[in-house]
Image (cartoon, rainbow, N blue to C red):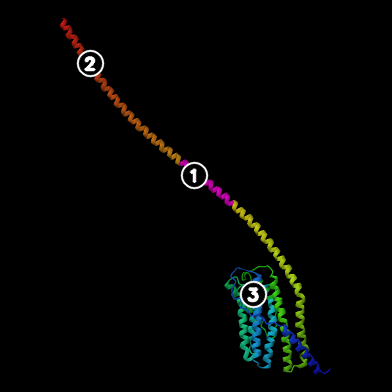
Amino acid sequence: MPKSQIAARALTCLLLLNLALSSCATVPEQSSFGREVIEDPVLSASQLRMFINEFVVQFRGRTEEASDEILEMKLSPEITRRALQWKIYAIPAIFRAASFEDPLAATLDSWILAKQIVYFFESDAGHDLFGDAQTVALNAARVIEEEISIIATTIGAKDESVSKIEAWADSLARENPLNNIYFTRSSFLRSYIRFMEEDGAGLFKSVTQLTESLSEFEDLFIMYAEYLPNQARWQVELLFMDFRLGAGITNLEKKMSNVALAVRQLSEVNKDLPAKLDEQKDALIADLDREWNKALSDIDELRIDTFDRITGERVAVIEAMDQEVKLVLEQITAERETILRDIEAVSLRISEELLKKSTETADHLLMKAFWLAVALAVIVFVLVMVGAMVLRKGRQEKA
């Protein structure tokens, strides 16, 4: 069969596939980006994963929007081709960065990727990729980097910690630059592990170890599954563009393999999704069991601690009451002794006064008795003398 007929049939098949994929492709929802900063000292993996999932949606939406804007400008065929390649290869890169099981690693790798894209569009290798539309791509990349930097502020334990984390991410982005529109990147995991072991201690908030919820893990798969039809459609558009640019049948096999790969990836995702969800569900249940048992243990410890504290407080209250009673008794005893001493002093004073008055009365009576006796003695003497005189006179008369 002539090559022209093969090419025609291939293009017809690709066109049908393109129409089919276009019918099931979805446009990512645009939502207001969460710009609030979490102030709690403890950050849950679920919270961080929700932020990353939201950022993936924003990254995809802004990349597609800027790429489509460049495509609508209808600049040179090469620029149009690069604009299409931008969203074909950049969006899978953010899905790979965000797919780390550790949400902290996903956050940092997404941040580094955003910085690499900005630096690539500013570098000699990428500063003229889109010609007059370069500012469109660069502005979109800078907005994306600003949005992930806002998320990154939630993982730092302190303000200075965020600066140190950003310095590390910035140095890693500059040391491993992007060199082409395919966004080929070196491994991030080794540098992340080394950074966490050597410099990461104390820089990050404590991220709880509870596994992400099933719905959040499923959201990431759903977003990727929604994206794959678009990826296949863009690959078909890129193939058509290559034909228009003259690449012809020589690139057909390569482009067809890319389309087949995208469809196969979607199939593998659909095939592996139930097992992944079951695995995450089992892990979540196990984590919930551990958290439940730990909560019960903490409640028992709290109950015992509360009982011990109440017992100690009761003993302290009883001891305090005993001290108060003892103090009151001592005060009463002291008051009683003081009152007794006062009564004794009063009694003594009264007795002395009575004795003094009795003595004075006795002396007065004695003086009265003495003078009475003297008066009686005088009267007796006078009577005796009178009697004697009378006797004498009587004797004289007789004589």
Viewer-side label of 1, 2: 1
Percent x, y for residue 4?
80, 95
Image-quadrant location for residue 23: bottom right
Judged from this view, the residue extending furthest toward the top is 399
Kindly identify the amino acid type of the residue bearing the numbered disc 2.
Phe
Q: Which residue is mark 1?
A: 328
- The number of numbered badges drawn on the structure is 3
Does the magenta portion include 287? no
Residue drawn 41% across and 38% down?
342
Q: Quick check: marks 3 and 2 in contact, CB under 8 Å?
A: no
Residue drawn 67% across and 74% down?
105
Percent x, y for residue 140?
62, 84
Q: Is residue 338 above or below residue 83?
A: above
* Residue 158 visible in this rendered orientation of the protein: yes
Q: Secondary structure at mark 1?
A: helix
Viewer-side label of 3, 1: 3
Label ID, residue 381 = 2
Q: Which residues are magenta?
A: 312-334
